[in-house]
Image (spheres, helix red, strand yellow):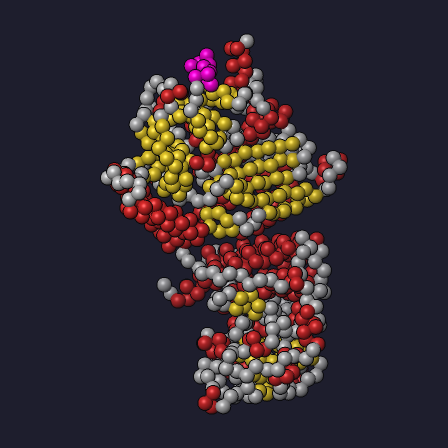
């Protein structure tokens, strides 16, 4: 692959992380819980995207990021208050920035006219004259942004290439910056050079440098890979502070740096005793391999509050072991550092490594094959008649345990927090609220809940539809909410949690709830249910999942186009999940999605039906038992129901349903398994016998063979045979509802 293509790909991968950090920070600001470090992190995210985009010539992205960054700098310097209206503009800007990144990555042509109104809003917030920087010909404003150049002709440090330019700067200088710059050994290890940076700094204006050599040890004590020099630089320039910071952008974390705007200041050598006082602590986000230091630019009028905080670490902590540590800072520095609230100190994130998803999938497939081979070995040992107390059997048990631990560890590699998906839903809520003219707030819970990456990717579309449905149909208009005594702002809560080996996602709203009378009326008009059907409230609520059902009276951007909640249900079922709804009129509704942690391996119960081996997913099983004749009741149609704890549930013979036999077995001769379907309703299935409970590797039947009724997938058993994994929801869907069963039984008993 072309090296530049690899770097470009890495840039866009980093953009995804930066956009995630940007979205999270803005949402934290919107909630009112953000501190100065959060605001700085938001600024750095946009600034980093702009810097990388400039290196690849993505001019449209640079232009938008520049004005976005400028507005954020106004907020960061406390010249612009982050009001609700300002936050709405900033959140929309984050959305547009994400769109521009995606378009740039795909190489699409960008129509900047679409973002022009938003740019005008940002310029107004930042106090920028929209005509500034343009000439009478109407040319676009030229953004003054230059990536750090690499010039290997070092020449004399501090000497400008063009003396005439220096003279012009002398006569028109408006700003003076005092700069302290001390490289770390890592700066040189990463192929950077201090003299190049100082030369680049000199292109901004007139520089006066003083080199501090006090830390240079004796010749026999020098570490060839050490860093001992530091520089004090006085810079006279017409440029802004952000341009000065840009010079050092690509060495953040590899140097100690202070840039302070001054009215007048003469460069002087700084001794070690006063060094700690003169250096403001850079906020760092560290991993084992990478350290990122906050190089956020100072404004010319007022520095950011966090920029002037004294260092919490001593220079001895940052200096190499072979460099003499400077004396401790004066007493005032620790006091200032101690005054910083503990809540603003964030623990460093864990070290991470980027791995292509295809490699992870390959590893998971190999672990799946290992699980199959372990089952085969166990089967061979059993057929060989080895005693349970034998060494072979004991070692196989250990292998089984290790295989399971390996499988769980590998699956954890592909597991990812659901937070990025939840953050994407914030944009969906904003767009849906704007489209409907409603005021809606999204709250998220359980963002750290982990789920298989494949599940996350396929969950995005159904979750988007459900969020839009909650805003469009669930949340009332402002007038109706006020009339009902509610706040004019509706709330949608998106939560995730682990329950019984599954991931449960809930979308709840505080809207009007489901109008069951209208839902039933629409279902009858569309012929989805009989007019005399007796349904429970829960069954009426779940009618909205039926194909073709819609309560929209008019076609809009959000609804009324025939793509209903049935599509959502099918999408979730394709993931091995369940979808259900519960509603309280006037209070709101809760949509619940239950999903497996992974699509690769599941825990199942291996059963027999007419000498065929099947697997029932363990998550669908409620209980198992041997039924007695008095628990079985026949309906007039020949169907059977099971009486359990005062309730009647349908009884399904698996062998008959799959065509293995024509006549059902006597329930008392088999084993009854109570299972639960998507809507929470229960049914009972009859199998001939239960073999055991084990982990099975899921193999797609549709991809390798074709769709089979009542079958979700297949697996390979220890003896090499294929076993079908039952689709419990499809199997129980044809059974009569519990409401109709109760009525028929009561009629028969009467």
Residue 12's place in the image compared with 177, above or below, is above
Q: Is residue 117 left or right of residue 356?
A: right
Please provide the residue range marked out in magenta.
629-639
* Residue 638, quarter of the rendered image: top left
Q: How far from the left and from the top, in percent, is residue 506? A: 57, 40
Q: In this view, does 175 lie to the left or right of 230?
A: right
* Residue 232, quarter of the rendered image: bottom right
Residue 71 visible to the viewer: no
Q: How far from the left and from the top, in percent, is residue 373? A: 30, 45
Q: Residue furthest bottom?
A: 219
Residue at image position (45%, 61%) is 353
Quarter of the figure that contains the N terminus? bottom left
Q: How far from the left and from the top, in percent, is residue 334? A: 67, 74
> Is residue 102 or residue 304 the one in the foreground?
304
Quarter of the figure that contains the C terminus? top right
Residue 417's place in the image compared with 545, above or below, is below
Q: Is residue 344 left or right of residue 225?
A: right
Q: Residue furthest top?
A: 750
Residue at image position (33%, 35%) is 723
Residue 341 visible to the viewer: yes
Judge whether residue 531 is colored magenta: no
How many discs mark residues in the rendered view? Answer: 0
Residue at image position (51%, 88%) is 217
* Residue 191, quarter of the rendered image: bottom left
Judge whether residue 637 is colored magenta: yes
Q: How far from the left and from the top, in percent, is residue 492? A: 63, 42
> Is residue 279 or residue 486 the one in the foreground?
279
Residue 690's place in the image compared with 489, above or below, is above
Q: Is residue 243 left or right of residue 702?
A: right
Residue at image position (28%, 46%) is 392
């Amino acid at each position: 692959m072309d090296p530049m293509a690899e770097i470009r790909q890495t840039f866009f991968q980093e953009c995804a992380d930066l956009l995630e950090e940007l979205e999270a920070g803005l949402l934290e600001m919107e909630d009112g819980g953000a501190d100065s470090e959060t605001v700085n992190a938001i600024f750095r995210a946009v600034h980093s995207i702009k810097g990388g985009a400039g290196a690849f010539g993505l001019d449209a992205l640079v232009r938008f990021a520049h004005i976005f960054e400028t507005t954020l700098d106004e907020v960061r310097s406390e010249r612009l208050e982050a009001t609700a209206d300002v936050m709405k503009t900033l959140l929309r800007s984050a959305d547009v920035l994400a769109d521009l990144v995606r378009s740039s990555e795909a190489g699409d042509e960008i129509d900047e006219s679409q973002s022009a109104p938003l740019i005008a809003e940002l310029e107004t917030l930042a106090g920028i004259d929209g005509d500034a920087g343009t000439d009478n010909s109407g040319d676009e404003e030229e953004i003054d942004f230059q990536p750090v150049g690499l010039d290997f002709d070092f020449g004399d440090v501090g000497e400008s290439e063009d003396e005439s330019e220096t003279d012009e700067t002398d006569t028109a200088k408006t700003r003076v910056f005092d700069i302290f710059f001390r490289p770390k050994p890592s700066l040189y290890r990463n192929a950077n050079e201090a003299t190049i940076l100082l030369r680049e700094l000199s292109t901004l204006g007139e520089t006066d440098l003083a080199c501090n050599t006090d830390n240079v040890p004796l010749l026999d004590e020098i570490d060839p890979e050490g860093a001992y020099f530091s520089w004090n630089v006085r810079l006279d320039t017409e440029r802004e502070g952000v341009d000065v910071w840009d010079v050092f952008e690509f060495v953040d974390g590899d140097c100690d740096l202070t840039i302070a705007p001054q009215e007048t200041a003469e460069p002087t050598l700084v001794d070690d005793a006063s060094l700690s006082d003169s250096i403001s602590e850079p906020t760092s986000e560290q991993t084992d391999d990478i350290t990122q230091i906050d190089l956020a630019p100072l404004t010319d009028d007022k520095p950011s509050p966090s920029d002037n905080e004294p260092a919490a670490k001593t220079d001895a902590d940052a200096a190499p072991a072979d460099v003499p540590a400077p004396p401790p800072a004066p007493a005032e520095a620790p006091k200032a550092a101690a005054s910083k609230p503990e809540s603003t100190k964030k623990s460093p994130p864990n070290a991470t490594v980027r791995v292509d998803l295809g490699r992870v999938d390959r590893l998971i497939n190999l672990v799946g094959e290992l699980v199959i081979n372990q089952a085969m070995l166990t089967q061979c040992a059993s057929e060989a008649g080895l005693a349970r107390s034998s060494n072979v059997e004991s070692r196989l048990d250990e292998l089984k345990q290790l295989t399971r631990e390996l499988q769980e560890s590998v699956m954890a590699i592909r597991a990812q927090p659901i937070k990025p998906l939840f953050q994407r839903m914030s944009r969906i809520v904003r767009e849906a609220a704007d489209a409907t003219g409603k005021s809606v707030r999204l709250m998220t819970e359980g963002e750290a809940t982990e789920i298989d990456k494949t599940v996350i990717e396929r969950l995005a579309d159904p979750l988007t539809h459900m969020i839009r449905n909650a805003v469009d149909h669930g949340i009332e208009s402002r007038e109706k909410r006020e009339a009902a005594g509610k706040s004019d702002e509706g709330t949608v809560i998106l939560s995730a949690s682990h329950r019984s080996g599954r991931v449960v996602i809930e979308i709840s709203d505080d809207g009007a709830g489901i109008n069951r009378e209208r839902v039933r009326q629409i279902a009858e008009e569309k012929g989805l249910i009989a007019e005399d059907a007796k349904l429970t409230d829960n069954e009426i609520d779940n009618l909205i999942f039926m194909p073709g059902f819609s309560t929209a009276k008019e076609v809009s951007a959000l609804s009324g186009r025939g793509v209903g909640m049935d599509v959502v249900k099918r999408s979730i079922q394709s993931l091995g999940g369940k979808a259900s709804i519960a509603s309280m009129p006037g209070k709101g509704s809760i949509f619940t999605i239950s999903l497996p942690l992974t699509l690769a391996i599941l825990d199942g119960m291996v059963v027999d039906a007419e000498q065929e081996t099947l697997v029932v997913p363990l998550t669908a099983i409620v209980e198992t038992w041997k039924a007695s004749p008095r628990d079985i009741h026949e309906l007039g149609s020949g169907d059977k129901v099971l009486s359990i704890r005062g309730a009647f549930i349908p009884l399904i013979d698996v062998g008959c349903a799959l065509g293995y036999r024509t006549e059902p077995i006597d329930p008392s001769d088999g084993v009854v398994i109570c299972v639960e379907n998507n809507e929470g309703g229960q049914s009972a299935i009859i199998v001939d016998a239960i073999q055991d409970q084990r982990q099975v590797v899921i193999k797609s039947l549709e991809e390798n063979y074709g769709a089979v009724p009542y079958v979700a997938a297949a697996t390979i058993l220890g003896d090499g045979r294929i076993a079908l994994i039952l689709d419990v929801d499809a199997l129980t869907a044809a059974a009569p509802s519990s409401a109709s069963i109760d009525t028929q039984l009561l009629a028969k008993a009467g």
